[in-house]
Image (cartoon, rainbow, N blue to C red):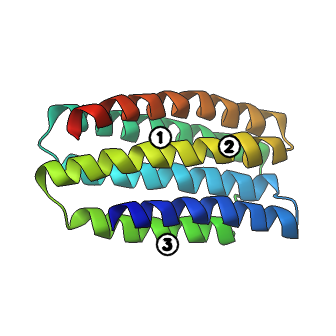
């Protein structure tokens, strides 16, 4: 069940981004909202892990996820403030939020080692999917150079997160 919800979340990200791109090119305002939403989803997952896990490695990882994603989201908010633009809610952001709520509920039903393994598995898959969306959809579609640079910085950081999650998954399985 965990794997199915994780796969559904990633299908939503990929298909919704593709659908939005086919209907009309993503605007910088939409891209900013999608990126911020994706970051907030990982902050929420990290907070859940901090509340539920007893595993020191998982706790350390969750603290890093919360700290890093909050920092990137803060940079994104500062940038849109500087540019005088308002992030625009869109179908991709909404679909991501809905799928993330379902995932959090699913993870909330787990405890102990089962929770840790499912949380870390989700983090691996989530970062893989978000990184792919950044690489193939969001960064290429960004028009503003500063937004594009922030997304590229995020991609580098989130690629490190993915590698860390992959390493951690070997420890908690």
Decide: is 47 above or below 13. Answer: above
Decide: is 144 above or below 85. Answer: above
| Quadrant for the C terminus in the image | top left
- Asked whether 99 or 144 is in front, the reply is 99
- Asked whether 19 or 39 is in front, the reply is 19
SS at mark 2 in the image: helix
Query: Residue 19: horizontal and vertical position, in percent?
Result: 77, 68
Q: Give the residue pinned by disc 3.
A: 98
Q: Residue at x 81, y 58 (%)?
A: 26
Q: Give the residue pinned by disc 1.
A: 69
Label drawn at residue 9: none
Of circles 3 and 1, the one toward us is: 3
The answer to the question of whether label 2 and label 1 lie on touching residues, with beta carbons closer than 8 A, is no
Of circles 2 and 1, the one toward us is: 2
User: Viewed as shown, does residue 122 lie left or right of 72?
Assistant: left
Q: Quadrant of residue 48?
A: bottom left
Q: Give the residue pinned by disc 2.
A: 134
User: Viewed as shown, does residue 87 lie left or right of 115?
Assistant: right
User: Viewed as shown, does residue 74 lie left or right of 118?
Assistant: right
User: Viewed as shown, does residue 121 lie left or right of 135?
Assistant: left
Q: Residue at x 67, y 48 (%)?
A: 133
Q: Residues within 10 Å of mark 1 (few under 14, many from 20)?
A: many
One can see residue 89 in this view: no
Query: Residue 2: horizontal and vertical position, in percent?
Result: 34, 63
Q: Quadrant of residue 73?
A: top right
Q: Mark 2 or mark 1: which comes first in sequence?
A: 1
């Amino acid at each position: 069940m965990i794997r199915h919800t994780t796969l559904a979340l990633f299908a939503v990200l990929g298909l919704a981004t593709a659908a939005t791109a086919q209907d009309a090119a993503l605007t910088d305002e939409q891209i900013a909202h999608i990126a911020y939403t994706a970051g907030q989803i990982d902050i929420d997952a990290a907070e859940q892990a901090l509340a539920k896990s007893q595993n020191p490695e998982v706790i350390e990882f969750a603290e890093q996820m919360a700290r890093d994603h909050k920092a990137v989201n803060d940079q994104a908010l500062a940038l849109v403030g500087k540019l005088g633009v308002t992030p625009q809610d869109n179908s991709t952001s909404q679909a991501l939020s809905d799928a993330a709520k379902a995932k959090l509920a699913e993870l909330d039903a787990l405890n102990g080692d089962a929770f840790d393994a499912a949380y870390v598995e989700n983090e691996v898959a989530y970062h893989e999917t978000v990184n792919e969306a950044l690489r193939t959809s969001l960064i290429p579609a960004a028009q503003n150079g500063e937004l594009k640079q922030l997304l590229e910085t995020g991609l580098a950081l989130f690629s490190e997160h993915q590698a860390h999650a992959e390493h951690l998954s070997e420890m908690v399985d």
